Image: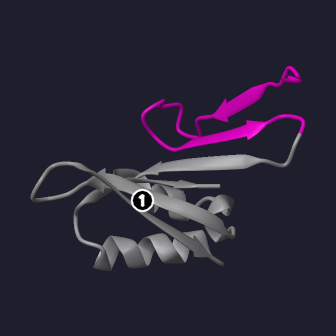
């Protein structure tokens, strides 16, 4: 296997490691954003909220308490998260967008 050293940078906009996290590989345009549902309003004010991409909502099944995920794609991540916040129930507690 051919491997190359890489650096991953994790930016904490609020300084809180449990808050919004933006990870990127410094030599590429790859970026992943993780948003706790409790920080949704804070995230909606960030420029990353208007980005396009694939995203995953993570949480637990209300009845079985087993892990649950929802995968989607969007042209405006912030708007789509607002819709999920209003219509997808309380099961999800964090979102990740690539």
Q: Position of residue 96 (x, y in %)?
A: 52, 53
Residue pointed to by mark 1: 57
Q: Where is residue 23 in the image (x, y as percent from the top left)?
A: 66, 39
Q: Where is residue 91 in the image (x, y as percent from the top left)?
A: 24, 60
Residue extending farthest to the front is 1
Which residues lie in the magenta part? Answer: 1-27
Whether residue 69 is situated above or below residue 11 in the rendered picture? below
Q: Position of residue 29 (x, y in %)?
A: 84, 49
Whether residue 13 is situated above or below residue 46 in the rendered picture? above
Q: Is residue 2 left or right of residue 25?
A: right
Magenta segment's dominant SS is: loop
Seen from the viewer's position, the closer of residues 1 and 27 is: 1
Q: Is residue 65 left or right of residue 12?
A: left
Magenta includes 45? Answer: no
On the question of residue 57 being in view, the answer is yes
Question: Residue at the location (12% across, 53% down)?
Answer: 64
Seen from the viewer's position, the closer of residues 80 and 5 is: 5
Question: Residue at the location (72% across, 48% down)?
Answer: 31
Quadrant in the picture for residue 52 = bottom right
Determine whether the residue tagged by mark 1 lies in a helix, strand or loop. strand
Magenta includes 25? Answer: yes
Q: Is residue 12 left or right of residue 42?
A: right
Question: Residue at the location (59% across, 40% down)?
Answer: 13
Quadrant in the picture for residue 92 = bottom left
């Amino acid at each position: 296997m051919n491997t190359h050293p890489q650096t991953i940078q994790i930016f904490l906009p609020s300084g809180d490691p449990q808050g919004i996290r933006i990870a990127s590989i410094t030599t590429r345009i790859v970026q992943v954003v993780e948003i706790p549902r409790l920080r949704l309003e804070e995230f909606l004010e960030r420029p990353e909220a208007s980005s396009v991409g694939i995203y995953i909502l993570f949480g637990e099944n209300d009845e079985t308490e087993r892990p649950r995920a929802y995968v989607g794609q969007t042209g405006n991540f912030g708007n789509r998260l607002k819709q999920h916040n209003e219509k997808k129930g309380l099961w999800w507690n964090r979102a990740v967008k690539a």
